[in-house]
Image (spheres, rainbow, N blue to C red):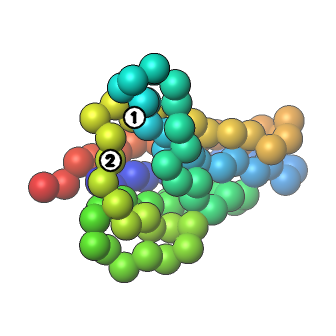
Amino acid sequence: MIVWLKVTAVTATPSIVLTIEGQNPVDGTWVTFYTFNAVTAISHNVFSVAPGITVSAGVSFSGVMPAIYRFVVTHADADSITYSLGHEIVV
């Protein structure tokens, strides 16, 4: 999987953190699979998730994805940040 997080505008000193969560099929709870590095500036960020890839702390994760997953973007403060998030499953 490739995940793109593109930041196009910032005001002051914002910070966002992207997390991937998987849903437990037994009870429906959400479990954090991986938390990527904080993004604080206008940038085009590419994150990778796949079994057997080279791990780079905060940028890539070596593992498989659960059947049901979601992305959570957490804002660290009230400063404005404009971003878009997309992903693609690569086989």
Query: In the rendering, at what x and y percent does residue 57 appear?
Result: 55, 73
Task: Quadrant for the C terminus, please.
Answer: bottom left
Camera-side residue of 40 and 37: 37
- Pick the residue in front: 77 or 41: 77
- Give the answer, above or below, for where 91 lies relative to 86: below
Q: In this picture, is 20 found above or below 44?
A: above
Quarter holding residue 42 = bottom right
* Residue 47: image tag: none
Residue 28, compared with residue 12, is above or below; it is above
Q: Quadrant of the N terminus?
A: bottom left
Task: Determine the residue positioned at 65% across, 49% down.
Answer: 17
Q: Is residue 84 visible?
A: no
Residue at the (52%, 30%) spot, across then down: 30
Residue lying furthest left in this view? 91
SS for callout 2 = loop
Instruction: Describe residue 32's horizontal placement relative to residue 81 as left or right.
Output: left
Side of 37 relative to 14 (left or right): left
Residue at 49% across, 49% down: 33
Tag 1 near tag 2, CB within 8 Å: yes
Residue depicted at x 63% and y 62%: 37
User: Residue 71 location, x and y as percent?
Assistant: 49, 37
Q: Tag 1: residue type?
A: Tyr
Amino acid type, residue under disc 2 in the picture: Met
Residue at label 2?
A: 65
The kind of secondary structure element at disc 1 is: strand
Residue under pointer 1: 69
Q: Quick one: label 1, few (<14), some, or many (20+) residues within 10 Å?
A: some
**Quick check: 38 left or right of 64?**
right
User: Could you give the CA–CA distance between mark 1 and mark 2, rounded to whole angstroms?
Assistant: 7 Å
